[in-house]
Image: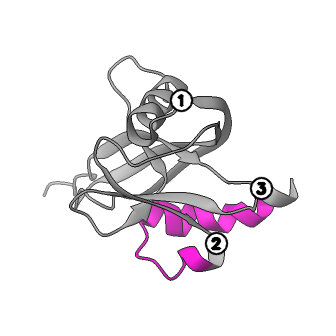
Amino acid sequence: MTAPSSPPVLHIAAALIEDAEGRLLLVRKRGTAAFMQAGGKLEPGESPADALAREITEELGQPPTRLSPLGEFSAEAANEPGHVLRAHLFRAEVAGPLHAAAEIAELRWVTPAEALALPLAPLTREQVLPRVAGLAEA
């Protein structure tokens, strides 16, 4: 009898980006329904911070001015069935106007309550939103 195999793990870096009003930036990739944090997969040999800086610049049109690590979290992958994410989450600060670029179809600035009305990626729903209030208090 063989042991059940573990699902493949995707290593990503993701950004918690807030504006001055405390709204969160969520993105939706082209051809998908779920909203999530900006970010993406780490390239071989790339640090999580370097990967996130590259992804933010590609996806939002501006490099981050500051990245602060918030920890590592796991969740089911939203767009790759049968995969699990190992996500390095950072609070990111980005200056200048942001726009959807690369594979991003849509950007939305939402309050945590507004976010709950959207189709959300598991990482956003299960890990990010529950921490937003705690981060605001820190």
Give the answer, above or below, for where 16 lies relative to 79: above
Apparent side of residue 12 relative to residue 126 in the rendered image (left or right): left
Residue occupied by mark 3: 135
Nearer to me, 71 or 120:
120
Q: Which x, y percent locates residue 133?
A: 76, 66
Nearest to viewer (mark 3 / mark 2): 2
**Does the magenta run of residues contain 128?**
yes
On screen, residue 116 above or below 69: below
Secondary structure mostly taken by the magenta-highlighted segment of the chain: helix
| Residue 63: mark | 1
**In the rendered structure, which amino acid carries the disc numbered 1?**
Pro
**The residue stretch that appears in magenta:** 114-135
Where residue 111 appears, as percent x and y from the top left, is: 65, 71
Label 2 close to label 1 by CB (< 8 Å): no
Quarter-wise, where is residue 101 in the image? top left
Q: Is residue 24 magenta?
A: no
Q: How is the image coloured?
A: one colour
Residue reaching furthest to the front: 97
Q: Residue at position x 28%, y 54% from top?
A: 83
The answer to which image quadrant residue 91 occupies is top right
The percent position of residue 12, horizontal first and vertical second, equals: 42, 40
Give the percent coordinates (x, y) of residue 88: 53, 40
Mark 1 touching mark 3, by CB under 8 A?
no
Residue drawn where x is 55% and y is 74% of the image: 115
Q: Earlier in the sequence, mark 2 or mark 1?
A: 1
Q: Is residue 58 visible?
A: yes
To which residue does mark 2 refer? 112
Packing grade of label 3 (10 A; few <14, some 14-19, many >=20) is: few
CA separation in Å, label 2 and label 1: 24 Å
Circle 3: residue type:
Leu
